[in-house]
Image (spheres, rainbow, N blue to C red):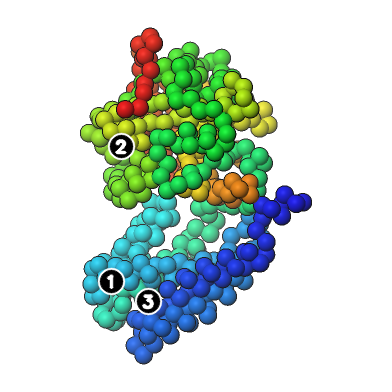
Amino acid sequence: MAGEDRRRRSRSGRLLDALVWGAALGAAGGAVLGAAVDGLGAGTGALIGLALYAPAEAITSLRRTVGATKPLWQRVFASALLMALLGWLLGLLLGSDAILPTALLSGALLGLLGLRPLKLALGLVVGAVVGGLAQALDGGLAPAVVAAAVTIAYRTIAALAYRDRPLVRVMAEEVPAAELHYVVPFEARSRYVGADYVEQLAAVRGGTFRRNPPDVGILASLDSLAGPTFDPARVDPLIREFYEHTSRFALSIFPEWRPWMKPAYEIFKRTVAEPLGQAAIPSNIEEAQRGMVSTIDTITLDGDDEIDIRGWIRTFADSGKPIYVGIYTSFRHDGRGYVSVGFPIPGANFTATLLPHNTGDGDLLLTSRTELEFAGHYLSTVDSERDALTVLKLLGFQEEIHVYVTRGELRTDHSFSLGGRRFLTLRYEIERLSEGAAQRPS
């Protein structure tokens, strides 16, 4: 019981958090909306926003049960205030008379956050309609008001249209890592993840770090994945060797982006992925031709020789800058083996948990497309000091990794989908290194 008390914030602590956040967002959003209303002003608007939103945030936070989301009205309220701030910023950049561009950009952002192509289309349509009406009815409407109006309209329509198809599910709240085998509980403790993440993790965990030791793999043994859908004995020996001795191989990557996703990813890459040192996937063939270095970094704990943590680090060959940093684990449940790959980000982790299948003549398929409980994608906030994880499952995201041998050569097709629509396929050519050679970061 004492452990639970330590992990879960006290009622007074949660109330204080809610009041601080509610006061900040309510005052800021209220200020920009109040400034847009004749005779009201930013100061009065800030007081009204604080008085309305801070109590609402506190009440809904205290009433919310474990694993539940806040009521829709509260989520719409918060979104409208946040988007009012964005609309105000757009007004500064584009001009106060840029009503339609502000509405379209607001709708596009809301749609992109919905992680479904149809939601992006819905956001653009709502932005166009609300922006057009705002121009026709009152050409002097402030951008902050326009953005808030688009938000309320979009969130209301989307809630009705997708009421039986939620995007996320709360899987756990303030739960110890040992109880969540399907999540990799390692976060980044700084704003930059980078290629040295595993070495830094070893220092935190008090383990022994080794960079790319010979013959190490991302899995200790493919046999750990055996289950009703997967017989390791049927897998081509080259595929087994790759998973159990990954450091023997070099990889070349060829990305295939769908046109509708590529512009959004370019923005994400420049503004988030590259500064973060994580998930900076090549955008095109030219960038992929810079070459890639693949290393397996390991950590041993408890003073023995058994590897406890395996990190697969991929960097650009010409610069040494990270493409991605993944921590590979496996676990078993109900006689099935799963692969979990955790991607640390500041204070949190994105985990892909995949179920193995036998396909073709000796092929391996890892997929999240299954009705089984644990396969899927999870975003977790990690509080290592209190051993407390809060986990969301992303229901609209799917992933498949098809590993196969053709004409004696190892290949992988790694595809990603949103709402059932594929937006990216990474095609890998995998080649065994010459005897005694090993890839090293530049």
Q: Which residue is mark 2?
A: 282
Count of marks, rendered view: 3
Q: Is residue 342 above or below residue 346?
A: above
Q: Which residue is mark 1?
A: 91
Give 136 or 145, whichever is nearer the viewer.
Answer: 145
Kind of element beneath mark 3: helix
Q: Position of residue 318 (x, y in %)?
A: 26, 30
Earlier residue among tags 2 and 3? 3
The residue sitting at 40% across, 35% down in the picture is 195
Q: Position of residue 56 (x, y in %)?
A: 57, 73
Kind of element beneath mark 2: loop
Instruction: Give amino acid for label 1.
Output: Gly
Q: CA distance from mark 3 to mark 1?
A: 11 Å
Instruction: Name the image quarter holding residue 321.
Output: top left
Q: Residue furthest top?
A: 435
The residue sitting at 52% across, 33% down in the picture is 202
Instruction: Give amino acid for label 2.
Output: Pro
- In this rendering, position of residue 37 left or right of residue 62: left
The residue sitting at 77% across, 51% down in the picture is 1
Q: Are marks 2 and 1 in contact (CB under 8 Å)?
A: no
- Mark 3 is surrounded, within 10 Å at the Cα level, by few (under 14), some (14 to 19) or many (20 or more) other residues, namely many
Q: Quadrant of the C terminus?
A: top left
Give 205 or 121, whichever is nearer the viewer.
Answer: 205
Earlier residue among tags 2 and 1? 1
Kind of element beneath mark 1: helix
The residue sitting at 47% across, 33% down in the picture is 199
Q: Position of residue 84 (x, y in %)?
A: 38, 71
Q: Which residue is mark 3?
A: 32
- Mark 1 is surrounded, within 10 Å at the Cα level, by few (under 14), some (14 to 19) or many (20 or more) other residues, namely some
Give 94 or 375, whichever is nearer the viewer.
Answer: 94
Earlier residue among tags 3 and 1? 3
Q: Residue furthest bottom?
A: 39
